Amino acid sequence: MRKVVSILFLLFCLVLCGQSVDFGKSARDFSTSGDEGTRAVYHSQSGVLELGTRFQNEGSRRACWDLPVSLDLNKIAGVRFRVRFLNADLASQLDFFIRMDGVWLRAAISPQTNGKWEEFVISKASFMPEGSGQFSWRHCDCIRFAAWRGSPGECAIHLAALDFIPANVSLAIIRSGFGTKVSENSRKEALRYAKNLGEVLVSGGIYPAVIDEQDVTQAILKQYRCVALPGGEFTSDNTVNQLTAYLRQGGRISGFYNLPPRLANAMQLPAGKFLKSSSLPQPITQLQTNGGATFKQNCNALLAVTASPSENLKFRAYWVDATGHKTPYPAIVQTPYGFWMTYVYLNQDPGKALPVLAAFFEDFVPGLRKAGAEQLVKLAKFALGNAGAGDHTVAKKHLARAQERQQSKDYPGVVAATSALIGALADEGLHVATTGTSSGNSKEMRGAWIRSGTGLPGENWWKTLRRLKIAQYNAIFPHFLSPHAAAWPSKTITGRLVNAKEDVVAECTAAGASLGIQVHAWVQVLSIADASETTKNAFAKAGRLQKKANSQTVPWLCPTQRENRMLMAQAVAELARKYDLAGIQLDMLRYESSNACYCEHCKAAFQRFAGHALVQWPQCTHEKEKSAWEAFRIHQITALAQELSKAIRGARPKIQVSAAVYSNLNDAKKNVGQDWVEWLQKGIVDFVSPMDYRPSVALFQGDLTRQRADAGQFANRIRPGIGLTVNNLSKEELQRQIQAVRAAGMEGFILFELTHGSEL
């Protein structure tokens, strides 16, 4: 049993525009759910509210603490925590929820350290609605803290307070995509674009207000010098009318990508023609300002402006291709009414993008960078003051430099110094020096996944693998096979993943052999989510896809059906036989979710597995037959893993077989039928790569600890996946997570994923 975990928030009230919650008085109002021992107790002497639970191996997946409130959060910038996490590895996930008009909105809580006080802010733009119901931020009636089970043990969250903070600058982000006529994909995209922009600004101490489209009024807009439109479809003409009127009254707009024509005309912006990056000689990979500052931005498309600059039309930045050449296409256009970026902001390189974006916003919001610098220095002082025992020499030097840069009004310098301070404190917690990629261990796998079957866009495999070689990586995992398409002229799979005339798999293996880089083919075993609608419909018509309990099909092959199993066994055998690969990695070797598969094949197979007739199908799988159903699903996936492994090794006996797997073993077994420890124990795979995509080393270490315990004597056959691009890890944070892998005694790691500009 682990010692008690606690999350301690410093003592001060929840205050927003005169609204406050006194946790001392409200402790009795908390309702709880979770395992036995879930509780809310206020400790008056310390001013701390204890939210505790005891995670059990077979108990509840989540503990929740709900507090009813009555708040108007329409104009807030975000939620600020002062917090300390102890033994953060007990929880696989920590969330904060807000409920409005019956709709829950969720944001992840991501501690940067373990056992030290820290202060961080979650942008309001980071809160994603669960479901599609309509809501208003004016009507918040409940807040929730949630901790998801990672490992068994006592867990306590000690709260003193949290803040719903107003904007500290005269800037507001308008979130779009909430109308009933907007598709689910468009809605998600619009929310993601707003999240990207909100999070990069908040990381720099700049806290813009965030207003959802349905809450936009003239009374609200006129309170801000500038509003940002991060991209996405507006759902009503009224929004465009409000924004156009706002411009006429002296407001300014920063727009991204596809603005409504009427609004673009009001801003005196030139027209832009839709242009796919793939149609250019080299793909777009960066934005570069006229002053030479750059940040990574792998654009799939852009709006190509061909107008000429003038006194009132300035081109402040251009798109740069993969070779480093500046294209003729402006990336940021400025008029007296604001600025326009000709693609959405992707947040792929936040450390470099932040000073650039802040400078453009400063043109219309004077004092914006000063406010950000002040907040960053406050955060740095707090972090250092609560760093615990030790002299913290390096961190103190970074704080002194941050204060010097603040005095000289060097905002990029403040950003760099405060980031270095937080990094130095995180390094202290690792107890391992970050010494670069190479560990001196000849057995260590240093790999990267890559989606493209042809190498990085605009390059061939030789050039791409030379990049890896220079960065001291020794393995590549390219996507070469799916159930519907292959990267080579396959006799088994008719579809093609690439359009190249050459044999790209042969080119990759030849380049790998020459450069000393292992090539492991990345195979999607069951998912066809990225196939064309025609292909999906063909599989569905043949009855070969997984089905939910309500009979809705999902774009994943059913693992129970022999035809599907034989297809993939033949395909991986062909791949292994034809090419001298170091390995084949099986990905998406699982069910789509806990709500699949309920097709007739699965029903018949489960009835044979259970050994008796089923009563009340499919309800019985959640009731009397629940344990048998979970065992059946594990059996099906493990049997498929065995068949594929046997086919691969039969074609090439010395090849390595591996699998990309869910990070949490318990969830993997219960939700998707994936018992990857059994695969290691039976020798079905040579190693597994849990997808440990975490934004901070504090959480990442928790995954490693849990996986070592789960795997036991096979722990040295774990090659963790690190979420390089999933969480936009800085080079410094990447090195911390690599060092955590080495400290855990694991012989390698794989980055997700290799792209242009990746901080290897």
Image (cartoon, rainbow, N blue to C red):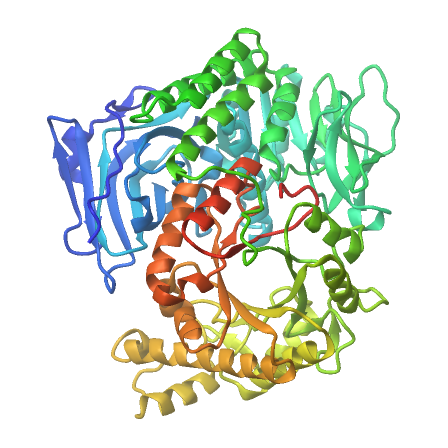
Residue 513 drawn at (x, y percent)? 73, 63
**Where 99 sits versus 561, above or below?**
above
Residue 140 drawn at (x, y percent)? 34, 36
**Where 179 sits versus 26, above or below?**
below
**Where 711 sits versus 299, above or below?**
below
Residue 145 drawn at (x, y percent)? 29, 42
Q: Quadrant of residue 156?
A: top left
**For residue 284, side relative to residue 232 (left or right):** right
Along the viewing direction, whichever of 313 and 214 lies nearer the viewer: 313
- For the point 44% across and 74% down, the residue is 679
**The residue positioned farthest toward the top in the image shown:** 407
Residue 109 drawn at (x, y percent)? 38, 40
Marks counted in the figure total: 0
Q: Is residue 248 visible?
A: yes
- For the point 78% across and 22% down, the residue is 290
- For the point 32% across and 55% down, the residue is 150
Q: Quadrant of residue 116?
A: top left
Quadrant (top left/top right/bottom left/bottom right) for the N terminus: bottom left
**Where 613 sits versus 367, above or below?**
below
Along the viewing direction, whichever of 702 and 594 lies nearer the viewer: 702
**For residue 668, side relative to residue 57 (left or right):** right
